[in-house]
Image (cartoon, rainbow, N blue to C red):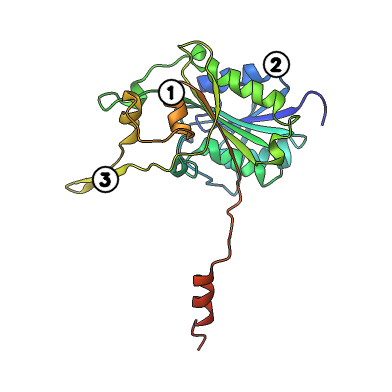
Amino acid sequence: MNDEPSILLTNDDGIDSVGFRALYDALTEVGSVTAVAPNSDQSAVGRAISHEVPVHQHELGYAVEGTPTDCVVAGIESLVPETDLVVAGCNRGANLGAYVLGRSGTVSAAVEATFFDVPAIAVSMYIPVREDAAFADVEENYDSYAEATRAASYLAAHSMGAGVFEQCDYLNVNAPVADRGPAEMAITEPSRVYQMGAERNGETVTLHDRIWERMAEGDIPDPEGTDRRAVVDGKVSVSPLTAPHTTEHHEALDGLAETYDRS
């Protein structure tokens, strides 16, 4: 790898989102950055993938009519084959908790990169929301992402050389809004607290994640050392994670296999 890494930048909010541009600008101080990102909002699509996607030239690189996973596959295999590092973000809104990882298009882009043996960093910014404030109504601007881009640039510049990716596949980074001054960085693990609920009203069922209002109030049950606790405490959370699903020896399942009726 050259001293200046080739960075493939993608996201799920779309290539023209404010957070994407803020992260692109910051990473240009670290390496050679090429955008390969969705041309429109693809939030919460997980690892959805397409068979064929139109690709358009963009001032930052390439705009893809597809998902974040499409962008990573197309980028590494065709558009930016010299990629040393994939960075996904900066997402408008946090990606915290074990149950969120598979839903997030931002995190899924990082996961996809690891199957190509390319290290990756997913970057998100936490925006406090309360029960009486819709997420879409919360204002953010370019400067709001300064804490997230500072952390992402630091990790992009130093993590590969420090051997970080010899012990993990990707990093999930969540930063607070940049309104309190420089934040401390905390190494965390995804919280396992789960507070999804559902309420039926006639012909519809409304799904609701109760944890977001609790976060906005600072009243969360998550223990020290977890990603959500760190962000609520005003820190930058960095979770080192592995991507492939793991398997373990299960004696109980072995017993079922032995008694399986093959007739």
Q: Are marks 3 and 2 in contact (CB under 8 Å)?
A: no
Task: Give the mark nearer the N terminus: 1 vs 2.
Answer: 2
Number of marks: 3
As drawn, the label of residue 129 is none
Residue 166 to residue 1: above or below: below
Residue 164 image offset from top left, x and y in percent: 69, 35
As drawn, the label of residue 29 is 2
- Near mark 3 (Cα within 10 A), the count class, few <14, some 14-19 or many ≥20, is few
Residue 102 to residue 134: above or below: below
Residue with the mark numbered 1: 233
Image quadrant in which you'd find residue 24: top right
Q: Nearer the viewer, residue 69 or 194?
A: 194
Task: Give the mark nearer the N terminus: 3 vs 1.
Answer: 3
Residue 60 visible in the snapshot: no
Q: Secondary structure at mark 2?
A: loop
Alpha carbon distance from label 3 to label 1: 28 Å
The three-letter amino acid code for the residue at tag 1 is Asp
Alpha carbon distance from label 1 to label 2: 29 Å
Q: Residue furthest bottom?
A: 263
Residue with the mark numbered 3: 198
Q: Nearer the viewer, residue 74 or 102?
A: 102
The three-letter amino acid code for the residue at tag 3 is Ala
Residue 199 image offset from top left, x and y in percent: 22, 45
Q: Residue at x 73, y 22 (%)?
A: 31
Q: Nearer the viewer, residue 21 or 169?
A: 169
Image quadrant in which you'd find residue 232: top left
Residue 183 visible in the snapshot: yes
Q: Residue at x 50, y 89 (%)?
A: 263
Alpha carbon distance from label 3 to label 2: 45 Å
The three-letter amino acid code for the residue at tag 2 is Glu
Q: Residue furthest right?
A: 2
